[in-house]
Image (spheres, coloured by chain):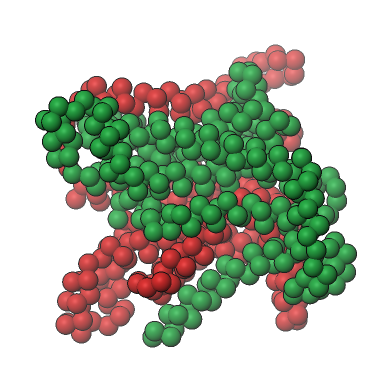
Chain colours: A red, B green
Amino acid sequence: MNKISNQRAWWLVVPVVVLVAFNALIPLMTVVNYSVQETFGNNLFFWHGVGWFEQVLTSERFHASLLRQLAFTGMILIIEVPLGIAVALCMPRKGPWVSVCLVLMALPLLIPWNVVGAMWNIFALPDIGLLGRMINGLGIDYNFTQQPVAAWSTTVLMDVWHWTSLVVLLTYAGLCSIPDAYYQAARIDGASSWSVFRYIQLPKLKRVLTIAILLRFMDSFMIYTEPFVLTGGGPGNTTTFLSIDLVKIALGQFDLGPAAAMSLIYFLMVLLVCWVFYTAMMRNEEQ
Amino acid sequence: MKFQKLLITTLYILFLLLPIYWLVSMSFKTTNEILGVFSLWPIEFTLDNYRKIFTDPTWYNGYINSLIYVVINTVISVSVALPAAYAFSRYRFLGDKHLFFWLLTNRMAPPAVFALPFFQLYSATGLFDTHIAVALAHCLFNIPLAVWILEGFMSGVPKELDETAYLDGYSFWRFFIRIFIPTIAAGIGVAMFFCFMYSWVELLLAKTLTSVEAKPIAATMTRTASTAGYELGLLAAAGTLTIIPGAFVIYFVRNYIAKGFALGRV
């Protein structure tokens, strides 16, 4: 659509800018402020330069949680995106079952995150949980509160349970928008269902899949509540992701400087990835 | 082929429902049964857990508090996002693209980054522990999302609609309220659904910004879990009740849900 150039349109945006700026800029400035200062209590602050940034960037603790975070985000993307596409392809297109499927699938998305954690906690506990009992019944020794591998797989499984539906719903919306004519043409050409997927559905899904990956990347990169309630970051530090670590430093130990420096590094990383995705998406749209 | 598809869909839905079933079934059990016997369904069926929640003010006030700030947040987010989304979808203006991306960056900001400064900001402005504080804080990620969704829906409405209305002598606000808003009612529904959803499920900021007066149900739950030992039945009942508003809202928007998740941009 051709847009008209109109500077007065700014007036329509002003309320949004004011509200978001109040919430975003003031806290962000506070963080920047802390990140370059040292304090000995009593509200006395001293200039500390980039010391905190150096400290965070070279600390092993930060490296470890960043690595865990990357591994976690990578794992859930590898599982959730193909699984989501597969389920969306299997869903009925028409009929009364469509809304039933949609409502049931959207259900996990609307459960408060700490309830998700608590629910999986009681579901996976080896003594009273259904999942824990089942796995132990198969002869596998499983206790996610003590074994790092079990804790990891439970956290990943929980996230798959919680968020795959988002990928399903997005992909489903994309699939519904493909006109029937495309499929008819494919049928005339005698295309196999794989080539229909590869050459018709996948290209048409590019846009919604970008949104899905983008949303899943940002949300999994800032995951806090669910693993915190499920495992508390343990056993040991094995499921301490970036946000959990940050909250421990900021609100637990009250180390303002390092916490602020870490916040900024963290935020910039998310921003960078999202900017790359966003630019790619916008360029696609213009073509 | 048909059978295979049905099987995969059914298995996936079963996988989604199993943990929920376990939570609901646990909410009808007594603490003794939960810890003592392993049973697939409640043997000594009890409603005590629910009775406790509906009679104890610290519990049911949690629900009321959560619903109050979620509703305030949804109303604020959508009403300020409407004109902004219109501006983004119809006009070019200085810095519009940068502004749009800046708004989106706030959706990307990890709440953990903002927890501490938010606490200080809202303490300094005297809003700490009020519903409005949580509602405003949640605007950080809900306004960008609402703008993004509404912009998608508005771009789908042909510009001729606006032009005809202006030719007919409608003023901007009269056109906007009388004609444009009814046209994109579906989009507004979807945007409200998303604002409701993200505000309802968020805990970190809501917990940081409240102590007594506006304490959300989710925070009541975590505090009970940590202080009163393991009252699992009670916890399960509270958890089950938090699913209900979400399920209720999904039911109403079920026909728009697929489109809304694609942010109106399929």
Q: Position of residue B57 (x, y in %)?
A: 76, 40
Q: Is residue B120 visible?
A: no
Q: Position of residue A201 (x, y in %)?
A: 29, 68
- Residue A133 is left or right of residue A24, and the answer is right
- Residue A5 is left or right of residue B202, and the answer is left
Toward the viewer: B199 or B124? B199
Q: Is residue B167 visible?
A: yes
Toward the viewer: B15 or B48? B48
Q: Residue at x 49, y 55 (%)?
A: B250
A141 lies above or below B224: below
Looking at the rendering, in which quadrant would you find the N terminus of chain A? top left
Residue A146: quadrant of the picture: bottom right
- Residue A96 is left or right of residue B57, and the answer is left
Q: Position of residue A31 (x, y in %)?
A: 57, 26
B31 lies above or below A134: above
Furthest-left residue in this view:
B167
Q: Residue at x 38, y 52 (%)?
A: B260
Residue B212: quadrant of the picture: top right
Q: Residue at x 64, y 64 (%)?
A: B20
Count of labels in the image: 0
Toward the viewer: B97 or B13? B13
Q: Residue at x 78, y 60 (%)?
A: B47
Q: Position of residue A145 (x, y in %)?
A: 77, 60
Residue B33: quadrant of the picture: bottom right
B232 lies above or below B25: above
